[in-house]
Image: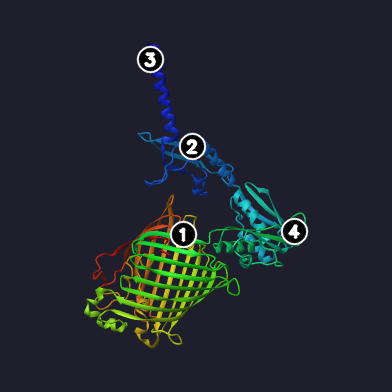
Amino acid sequence: MPGARILFLFLILAVALCVAGCREQGDIKIKSLTFNGVKQVDKKALLNALATKQASRLPWGHKTYFDRPAFQADLERIHAFYLDRGFPDARVRSFDVQLNDTQDEVKVVVNITEGEPVRVASIDMKGFESLSEAQQRSLRESLPLQPDQPLDRQLAVATRDRALNVLKDEGYPYAAVAMSSEDVGPKRQRIVLAATPGALAHIGVIDVRGEKTVGENVIRRQLTFKPGDRFTRKELRESQRKLYGLQLFEFANIESLEDKDVQAPEVPVRVTVAEGKHQKVNTGIGYGSEEKVRARVRWDHLNFFGGARQAGVEARWSSLSRGVRMDYTEPYLLTPHFSLRFEGQAWQAREPVYSQDTIGGRAIFKHQANQQNFWSLSLINEFEQSSIANVALQDFSVRNNLIALGLDPRTGETRGTVGAVALDLSRDTTGNLLDATHGYRVTGHVESAGRFMWGTYNYWQAQGEGRHYVTVAKKFVVANRLNVGSITPQGDVDQNVPFHKRLFLGGATSIRGWGRYEVSPLSGSGFPIGGLSMLEGASELRMALWNKVGGVAFLDYGNVWADAWSVNLGDLHYAVGPGLRYVTPIGPLRVDLGYQLNPIEGLLVNGEPEKRRWRVHFSIGQAF
């Protein structure tokens, strides 16, 4: 049966070809994708522009497979990518696709010759006389495209848009900006921005649409502009942000309705909203090396009795803290910048050194100038009951310490009422509380208890913190933090400071070579008893390693001193170590290993002398 035999061989060949084709198109995993010769462009941006991707190195990560037609198209995309960034001579010199022995994984190597880019010789600005000299200078310095840079097309478009937006932010909604370029030498071009500002305009009629249960007055009071004000796109954007900040709307849009043909001196504005659910329930569960398992449930009513008033109830539980908190916020007090908030709580704290039960509340009067700046004044009335850890009661050598700290030496307990007034200030330019990459944050806290206030305790407290973040070479984030504070008992009697107010350092967000609250003045037997002054700082170098995984190297330092305002820079404890970060939607998943450079002599941990100089911390969010 020669015919059947030939047919059988043909079928085997067809199946083999099919398998080979399927393997080539979808079964060969991309183990690595390497570029050689990429020096003048962002390699990460180049990778993101391609269809061919390296598979994740994590077992649960995304797997990618080699597709030859897609790879061939990527070779053309590389040329287009470089052309857009001002490199007309860039080309793929060669490439190598290396299969492993089992032919189920491939290593892809692409060799690129970049060549010399076309650079910007200068940027001429014409028609911007409607802006002041200072505004023109500021605009020139903020342009994405700068002299001597490669002529990146995306940056060129962003440069034109930046110039146009500045004019619109200064009252010229009908402005137009044209961009042109001309050769002034070999691979050198001069960029010309020619502006036509148009007529100066002001805000006209404001039309509000889409509201149902939220009053129109609530929407209008969030607007940072009114009819007759000078037109500016900046205020339209800020007002839209404030509308979203109410959390009442699934959609909020503010648009100007200018007619460029007419160029009327007054520009109508339309505000369109779509209301969301006003009652929300949020739950969460997590784990950290300090809190262990933690759980949270919160109910919010975002339009309580109308007027965008907010009320909420929250319950939390972890090994460190648990309890119930309630709050009510009056968001508009005389002006949109002022608000009044009431908080009440029944709370338990179970720290390694002490336990504390709190019942009471506070009223907070807040002024929010803008997204970056606020100050608040708080009136506090809380009943506190604190007790020292059992391990301290078993050590009779700390009896005198307990008496000096206002604790009953038999039970290790103290109780009293905190009546205090507190002032808080904050300026934050980072724009990201969970994972900042630029900007700074400065906070200050001053609190006074006793004197003219009711209560058992009599002290005043001052604390200030600064954080700074800067991105270096587009790959590294250098983060620095410094925190200084002190509590002064009135009458120089330590009992005037409640024990839970005493200062401790160490832990996942403090000096990471030690556990929580282990950095502190010690009793005669080595038990941490807290102090009245502290200084702590940290420096981190953060960088991306691959995909969503990042690495950190850190140096932490600080100490706590027994007396008020007794900081001694020669008496600091230091910890260093590495860390890993994995980016998640709720912040980086964090693992840090801290090592003590100078251990605390005589420290007791869990009632026993400290046995190791390192700690591992696991949590969500950056350490600072």
Q: Are marks 2 and 3 in contact (CB under 8 Å)?
A: no
**Numbered disc in front, either 2 or 4:** 4
Give the x, y percent position of residue 39.
50, 48
**How far separated are the C-alphas under marks 1 and 4?**
42 Å
Say which mark, if any, is on residue 477.
1
Mark 3–mark 4 distance (CA, rounded to whole Å): 84 Å
On the image, the x and y values in percent for residue 107 come to 41, 39
* Mark 1 vs 4, N-terminal side: 4
User: Image height check: is 40 above or below 621?
Assistant: above
Dot 1: what SS? strand
Residue type at numbered disc 4: Gly
Q: Which residue is mark 2?
A: 94
User: Residue 344 falls in which quadrant of the image?
Assistant: bottom left
- Marks 2 and 3 sit apart, C-alpha to C-alpha, by 44 Å
Q: CA distance from mark 2 to mark 1?
A: 34 Å
Residue tagged 4: 198
> Separation of disc 3 and disc 1 at Cα?
68 Å
Q: Tell me: residue 315, above or below residue 547.
A: below
Does the residue at mark 2 contact the one at mark 1 (Cβ under 8 Å)? no
* Camera-side mark, 3 or 4: 3
Answer with left or right where residue 184 lies relative to residue 619.
Answer: right
Q: Position of residue 333 (x, y in %)?
A: 58, 74
Return the residue nearer the eye: 272 or 504: 272
